Image (cartoon, rainbow, N blue to C red):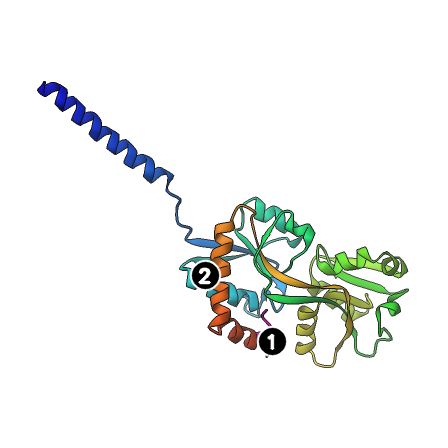
């Protein structure tokens, strides 16, 4: 009898150990780091300063959000035209770099709530004869590859067919360099980026105020299955808006609170 009781007790203890191991193995590990993918040539949202440090409005926002989440943050420059592949290939955890929310992108990306408006404007050199989209007929227009600016021009068949040439650049820095040298007549890009260039070289550029296409919004992109991470980040962003943190960061970069 004693042997039977002892055997039963041993089996019960073994069961508890196995159960304990099973619960530990299935416990979801706490994410301690978030890797942000970005185009590091997209001022003022994310770009490299004179010391080659990655800086910008979105950078400051992401750093503050990660701090509040108790997470380490890493900024990883990527080929923006391959952003969805980078995200879904799990080489990064989020896309946070002035990314426009579109219906097409929603098919593969889970977005945060919009945090800023995005308009596509035409930028030209001061003194240019171009005063409207109609004046682009017979001109050379530049955009960044895989940008909303490119989408807007391509979708407007009448506009695109009227152009002398349509040049697609890997980044907007190269596009504006060619605008400066006269290789292109205009650049179509996000209002925020274009106005940043205007603020750096006052009087050099002019913005055609009427937007091309619809007014869009910026959002942070996550993998479809990462709803928990998206919700955590969104909660922190909401708190940052309420406590004035996002307004302070916006004032530093834009001279006004333009966060939605």
Left/right of residue 64 with respect to residue 128 in the rendered view: left
Is residue 256 inside the magenta stretch?
A: yes
Left/right of residue 219 with respect to residue 229 in the rendered view: right
> Label 1 crowding class (10 Å Cα cut-off): few <14, some 14-19, many 20+?
some
Residue stretch in magenta: 253-260
Q: Quadrant of residue 25?
A: top left
Q: CA distance from mark 1 to mark 2?
A: 22 Å
Left/right of residue 199 with respect to residue 141 in the rendered view: left
- State the image coordinates of residue 108 (x, y, percent, origin top left): 63, 47
Residue 66 — which label?
A: 2
Question: Across the whole image, how many numbered discs are drawn on residues?
Answer: 2
Left/right of residue 241 with respect to residue 47 in the rendered view: left
Q: Quadrant of residue 144?
A: bottom right
Residue located 50% across and 65% down the image: 238
Q: Are marks 1 and 2 in contact (CB under 8 Å)?
A: no
Residue 145 drawn above or below residue 207: above
Is residue 80 inside the magenta stretch?
A: no
- Residue 101 visible in image: yes
Residue 19 — which label?
A: none
User: Which quarter of the rendering shows the N terminus?
Assistant: top left
User: Which quarter of the rendering shows the C terminus?
Assistant: bottom right
Earlier sequence position, callout 1 versus callout 2:
2
- Residue 123 visible in image: no
- State the image coordinates of residue 10 (x, y, percent, origin top left): 18, 26
Residue located 89% across and 57% down the image: 161
Badge 1 marks a residue whose secondary structure is: helix
> Label 2 crowding class (10 Å Cα cut-off): few <14, some 14-19, many 20+?
some
- Name the outermost residue toward the left: 2
- State the image coordinates of residue 67 (x, y, percent, origin top left): 43, 63
- State the image coordinates of residue 207 (x, y, percent, origin top left): 76, 74
Residue marked by disc 1: 254
């Amino acid at each position: 009898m004693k042997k039977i009781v002892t055997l039963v007790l041993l089996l019960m203890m073994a069961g508890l150990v196995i159960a304990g191991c099973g619960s530990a193995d299935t416990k979801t590990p706490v994410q301690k780091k978030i890797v942000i993918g970005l185009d590091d040539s997209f001022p003022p949202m994310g770009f490299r300063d004179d010391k080659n440090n990655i800086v910008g409005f979105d950078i400051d926002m992401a750093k503050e959000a990660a701090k509040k989440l108790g997470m380490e943050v890493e900024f990883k420059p990527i080929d923006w035209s391959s952003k969805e592949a980078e995200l879904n290939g799990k080489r990064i955890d989020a896309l946070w770099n002035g990314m426009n929310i579109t219906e097409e992108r929603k098919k593969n990306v889970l977005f945060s709530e919009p945090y800023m408006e995005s308009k596509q404007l035409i930028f030209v050199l001061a003194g240019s004869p171009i005063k409207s989209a109609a004046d682009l007929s017979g001109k050379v227009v530049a955009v960044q590859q895989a940008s909303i600016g490119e989408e807007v021009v391509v979708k407007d068949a009448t506009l695109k067919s009227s152009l002398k040439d349509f040049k697609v650049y890997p980044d907007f820095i190269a596009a504006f360099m060619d605008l400066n040298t006269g290789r292109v007549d205009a650049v179509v890009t996000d209002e925020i980026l274009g106005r940043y260039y205007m603020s750096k070289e006052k009087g050099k550029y002019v913005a055609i105020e009427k937007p091309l296409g619809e007014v869009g919004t910026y959002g942070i992109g996550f993998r479809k299955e990462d709803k928990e991470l998206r919700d955590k980040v969104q909660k922190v962003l909401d708190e940052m808006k309420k406590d004035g943190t996002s307004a302070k960061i916006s004032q530093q970069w834009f001279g006004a609170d333009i966060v939605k």
